Image (spheres, rainbow, N blue to C red):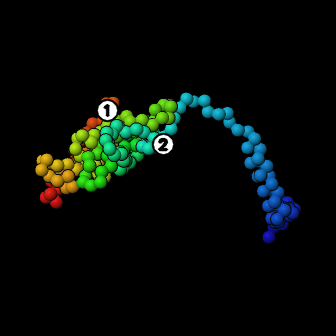
Amino acid sequence: MQPSAVPELAHTRTRPVHWLATAAAMAGVVALAGLFQPDGATANQPERRATTTAPDPADVRLPLECPGTVGVVTEKAIGDLDGDGGQEAAVTARCDAGSGSPPGGIYVLNRAKGGQPRVVATLLTPKDGFSVSDLAVRDGAVRATLFGYSSPDVPTCCPDKEERVSWTWRGGSFVRAVQGESDTAAM
């Protein structure tokens, strides 16, 4: 074996003091890097709605006419219906009745620029004569199942028509589409 021309170095074996020195040096580099931060970004971001939370229906006066009784919200669904990044609320409401299947309405709520909640669309009114079930917001559309009557002779407890519908925001208004219709008496 040929002897080395370089004398044996004392630091070729690691000792705890070497690890401590390396850790201290790294901590110093990280601390120094923290002192030098880049300037804030100056690119303009697209304007977004001031708040993305959906309005609470309790804060809005719904256009229900309930002489002698009160209006109640029966269902609420939340989602972005107009593609602006903010959350809207779709709610079903009806006059409180002791029995039967009272007709309901479907309303879309959002917040005005000042943050005040408001009704922006009436998709269905109680005067249309439908009771509403299964309200949902999916894929930017309000979806619901409507129950109605084939004739005035059908008891109000037992609607015999069922219709699955959706409303989608297009061209500045909500457009209604029917997904399915059936006789519930046949089911």
Kind of element beneath mark 1: strand
Note whether residue 90 is visible. yes
Choose between 68 and 162: the one closer to the eye. Answer: 68
Residue 136 appears anywhere in the view: no
Residue at horizontal 31%, vertical 32%? 173
Instruction: Provide residue 171's location: percent of width, then percent of height.
Output: 31, 30
Q: Is residue 89 left or right of residue 104?
A: right
Q: Label 2, on which residue?
A: 53
The answer to whether 68 is drawn above or below residue 2 in the figure is above
Asked where in the image residue 11 lies, by quadrant, the reply is: bottom right
Q: Secondary structure at mark 2?
A: loop
Which labelled disc corresponds to residue 103? none
Residue at the front extreme? 68
Residue assigned mark 1:
173
Whether residue 165 is situated above or below residue 82 in the rendered picture: below
Q: Residue at x 14, y 52 (%)?
A: 154
Q: Which amino acid type is shown beneath numbered disc 1?
A: Ser
Q: Position of residue 32 (x, y in %)?
A: 77, 44
Q: Please give left or right for residue 95 compared with residue 40 in the image.
A: left
Q: For the point 44% across and 44% down, which residue is it?
A: 58
